[in-house]
Amino acid sequence: MTNAIAFWIEAAGHGTLRAETLSPPGLGQTLITTLATGISRGTEALVFAGKIPPSQFDTMRAPLMGGAFPFPVKYGYSAVGCDPAGQRVFVLHPHQDRFLAPSAMCVPVPDAVPTARAVLAANMETALNITWDAACLPGERVLVIGAGVVGLLVGSLLARIPGTVVTMVDIDPRRARIAHRFGCQFDSRRVDQDLIIHASGSEQGLRLALDCAGFEARIVEASWFGDALPAVPLGGAFHSNRLRIIASQVGHIAPAMRGRRSHAQRLALALELLKDAAYDALLEPPTRFVDLPAEMPRLLAGGLCHVITYGTDPCSA
C-alpha cells in the first residue's frame, strides 16, 4: 500500500490536502510519483468557485478526477510525474503527490522538454484543437482575443502559417512582450479580420470579436463561460456580414482531424511542440504543493501558467 496526499476542493473557494491510501497497481495501471502539476486557470477557477452548471456535471468531469461536482471534488488534468522505470510521463490527473493511472494514459515526456514546461501539454493540446477547428489559411488576417495561456499558444501556432498576420488583444499590456516573442502583433484596433479566436472568457471579448469580424469571417469561441449567461449582440452587421461562430472544445477532436488522429496522438504532438524553449515565457514562479490550499485563490486570480512543485525528482536519481 502507498500513502498519497491530494488537493481537494471542499466548498466554493476552499481547498485542503487530504491523505489517502493507494492500492497496489492492478493490471494495466502504473504508480506515478508526481514532479509537477499545472493549473489551468480558466476551468479550474470555475470549479474552485462552484460555477459548473448541473447540466454539465457529466461533460466536465476530468478523466481521473475524484469526487463529484460541485463538491467535494479533486480536479485537474496537468500532471508530470515519474514512473517506476524512471521515465517522465504526462498524465491528465489532478494535484496529488502519488497516484495510480491507466498505463495507456501515461504519455512519455520528450527529453528536450523540461518538467515545468511539460505541464503546458494539456493547454497546448487545447490550442492544437482550436487551430484545427479554425482551419486557418495562408495569408489570413487573424485576431486572437485574450492573451492568456491558451490564447498565446494559439497565436504561436497560427503565426507559423506563411503570410498570416496574427494580432493579439488583451486588457493587460504586459502580454505584448510575449505576443511579440511568438511572432504576433499586439493591437486593439484591428477590424475586418478573416478569423477571430475568442479566448478571453468575457462577454466584452466576445462583443469585440463580433465588432472586428470582416465579411464572412469565422469566430472560433474557445472560452467556456460555465454558468454565466453572456449577452451576444447578434444584431447590427452580424447577418449581413454572414458571420459564423464555431464552438471549439478539447473533449472531442476537431472534425478536420477526427478519424485521422487519436487523443493520444494529439497529446503526443502537443508535447513535441513544447520542445521550443520560447514557451517558458508562459510559466509563473513555482508554488509548493504543501502551500496550495492557502495559495490557490491567489493563483487563480491572475498570471499565466502556475506550476506546482512536489519536492525531489526520482527520475534524476
Image (cartoon, rainbow, N blue to C red):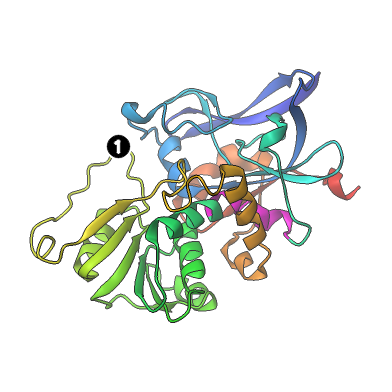
Furthest residue in direction right, as rendered: 317
Furthest residue in direction front, as rendered: 259
Give the x, y percent position of residue 72.
49, 23
> How many residues crowd mark 1 within 10 Å: few (<14), some (14–19), many (20+)?
some
Span shown in magenta = 113-123
Give the x, y percent position of residue 30.
76, 30
Please identify the quarter of the rendering in which residue 75 is found: top right
Question: Is residue 225 shown above or below 54?
Answer: below
Q: Is residue 34 left or right of residue 137?
A: right
Identify the residue at image location x=13%, y=55%. 234
Instruction: Assign the N terminus to one quadrant of the image.
Output: top right
The answer to whether residue 281 of the structure is visible from this angle is: yes
Q: Is residue 199 magenta?
A: no
Question: Type of residue at label 1?
Answer: Asp
> In the depicted view, which residue is nearer to us: 277 or 271?
271
> In the depicted view, which residue is nearer to us: 58 or 315?
58
Q: Which residue is mark 1?
A: 227
> In the depicted view, which residue is nearer to us: 224 or 281?
224
Q: Is residue 32 left or right of residue 316?
A: left
